[in-house]
Image (tube, grey):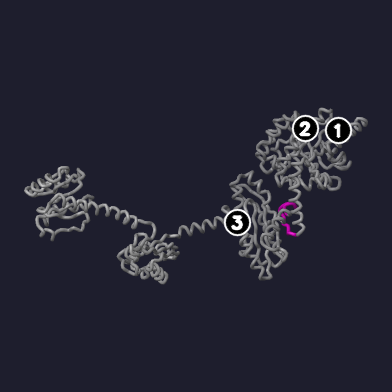
Amino acid sequence: MHILLVEEDAQDYLTIRQFLDEQSGKSKIDWAPNYESALKSSKSKNYDVFLIGYYARHSKQEAFLRWLYRFAKVPVILLLKTEDDTQHLDLSAYKTDYLLKRQLSWSLLHRVIRYINQLIEIDKSCQHYRFAFKQAVQFIGIFSPQGKVLEANQTALGSIDSSLEQVQNQYVWDTAWAKNNQAQFKSAVATAAHGEFIHYEMELETDQRGNIIIDFSLTPIKNDMGKVLWLLAEGRDLSERKDMEQQLTHATLHDHLTGLPNRQLFFEYLERAMQKLSHSHKRLAVLFIDIDRFRMVNESLGHDMGDWLLMEIAERLQSSIAPDNLLARFGGDEFAIIQEDVEDLADATRLAAKINKALAQPFLLDGCEVVTSASIGIAYNHDEIGDGANLLRNADTAMYRAKMMGKSRYAVYNQSMESNALSRLKIEAELHRGLERDDFILFYQPQLDLGSEQICGVEALIRFNHPHKGLMSPVEFIPILEDSGIIVKLSEWILHTACTQFKTWLAQGFPMQRIAVNLSALQFKSHNLTHLVAKVLHDTHLDAQHLELELTEHSLLEDTHTAIKTINRFKDMGIRVTIDDFGTGYASLNYLKHFPAHCLKIDKSFIQEITHSKIDAEITKAMINMAHALGMSVIAEGVETIQQRDFLRRNHCDSGQGYLYAPAMSQQDFMTWAHQYCKMQDHAI
């Protein structure tokens, strides 16, 4: 133990020092004869105890003691000459005590030191609790069992902009905390005073933040006998959590991009609206909206521009509907509207027409003008529709019918659509099974040079051999193949089978230059398409010059930059590329001149009327001339009459295909036809 003895009286110092040395040989004692020396030693060394000879009204001593009480955390024992000196002592500091010099003994000194050290340790613990109490972010207070405020931390006091002195010993229900909750506080205190824990949420009016929600509790603090001594009040501000819950609820029920209600909130609102209608004679309509060609915008201009377009579309849709209608975004490019209080179906159809008129106006996105439209399905509630789910499903079904009608249209649901939708689902399932059971077969239609009428090529066309219906028309199943994605896997099979077959025909001496295979829009967007085609050519040992790939105008326009790169790769491989169904899409000359295609195929819708319609005839001539000017050859599909063939010959169309020559045929029938046709041509020569 290291002791600093501060004693200005030399005789007293010697007496005390002798006494301490005799009874405590292990202690180290330093002597400071004055307070300047004492202060210097205290700052330079760590002492376990301070023994100070006390003299009343000693200014230097009082200054030193104040310094000790502030900085030292060890026992301070004052040594007095007489009892009379206690009249002037201030023993309020918990780490201070006194002894008479004449009664000094080591055992007494040791006991006092141990006692003060215990008080110091207790105070340290209390300091921790006191600091935690004052600095806690929660509201904490201590009440008497009668409800008087004994203590309150800064968080609690700050909420009502008060000090402890202003609320201490007041009944809590008389304070600003209970401004609007007096009865609630009185009831809570009465219950807790009987030993019961109280917990509830309450609204607290604050000066700075207005009304906040508090998670409030009162815990009775009891002694060993079970008597309630105090009530511990605790409160946690739930305002941020409540705000967060509201934000999360909003985020859960709203689309993050447009801020519109999402599918879940739309459906909840629809169900409530349907329930209201069950007690009235009013009607409502649901409009299901799908933005036409949005994917093309998204992929050609980028997702950021696509998001921008969706936000602009949402604004136009919102401005098109009445204030009591609900607009929601279901995700992607799908929106839905609940139109309430409709008089009849005409109200809904007028709204659909208004929407497409609004969307027909160009959108200007970062200097780029974008034109779009919507396919809209309308379902009108009536007695046969049981609930909101059916109404929404019917509107969705009608939307698909509108899209099949040519887009930028609306369709009103009727029951025949439901049977068509079910039939479509059934066919899709059968197509999946057909892929596994090899129910798909290839038919072949010859392509002829219109000048020489020699067979110059053949087009491979897919057919589905339905297990019960037999061969199905492509019109019935091709759109389903594309919508379901089955076309991607099937297209690989088509390409491999067609190349294998053509290689066999070449080996058998058939005089044909190439085989044309259609690529679906989905397959054309595949990143490994060129690798797949190269692999098929390698596996089938077919030279690339014998393969022609047909791409629809629409698939090229969805992402022109990628399309041009892909066509150039095919061109480098030696593969011919034909733009199929030309004239039915939206390609402009500006786009067309950049596509490095070899051939344009004029759609049969133009060929059918060239001998009867001056407009179709002029359009067809213009397309032939344009293609030749761009260095491309031209093939016409759907050639059915001699008059059509002659018109095409006169206008220098290079080749054609159609029923005038032969329909699409099975592999065996095609071989039979080809042998007969070649013999006929040889005989004619």
Disc 2 is placed on an element classified as helix
Is residue 533 visible from the viewing direction of this image?
yes
Closer to us: mark 1 or mark 3?
3
Q: Would you name the residue on which mark 2 appears?
A: 500
For the residues labelled 1 and 3, the Cα–Cα distance comes to 60 Å
- Image: 171 above or below 479: below
Q: Residue 484, percent across and down?
A: 71, 46
**For residue 582, side relative to residue 96 (left or right):** right
Front-most of residues 668 and 367: 668
Closer to us: mark 3 or mark 2?
2
- Which residue is drawn at the image coordinates 41% and 72% (left, top)? 183
Q: Would you name the residue on which mark 3 appears?
A: 262
Disc 3 is placed on an element classified as loop
- Count of all numbered marks drawn on residues in the image: 3
Q: Is residue 599 magenta?
A: no
Instruction: Mark 1 or mark 3: name the one nearer the start of the chain.
Output: 3
**For residue 648, side relative to residue 107 (left or right):** right
Q: In which quarter of the image is residue 497?
A: top right
Type of the residue with mark 2: Thr
Q: Would you name the residue on which mark 1 appears?
A: 454
Q: Which residue lies furthest to the front in this view?
A: 225
Q: What stretch is highlighted in magenta?
A: 402-414
- Which residue is drawn at the image coordinates 33% and 57% (left, top)? 134
Per the rendering, the mark at residue 51 is none
Using a 10 Å C-alpha cutoff, classify the residue at mark 2 as few (fewer than 14 neighbours), some (14 to 19) or many (20 or more).
some
Q: Residue 32, percent across and down?
A: 13, 46
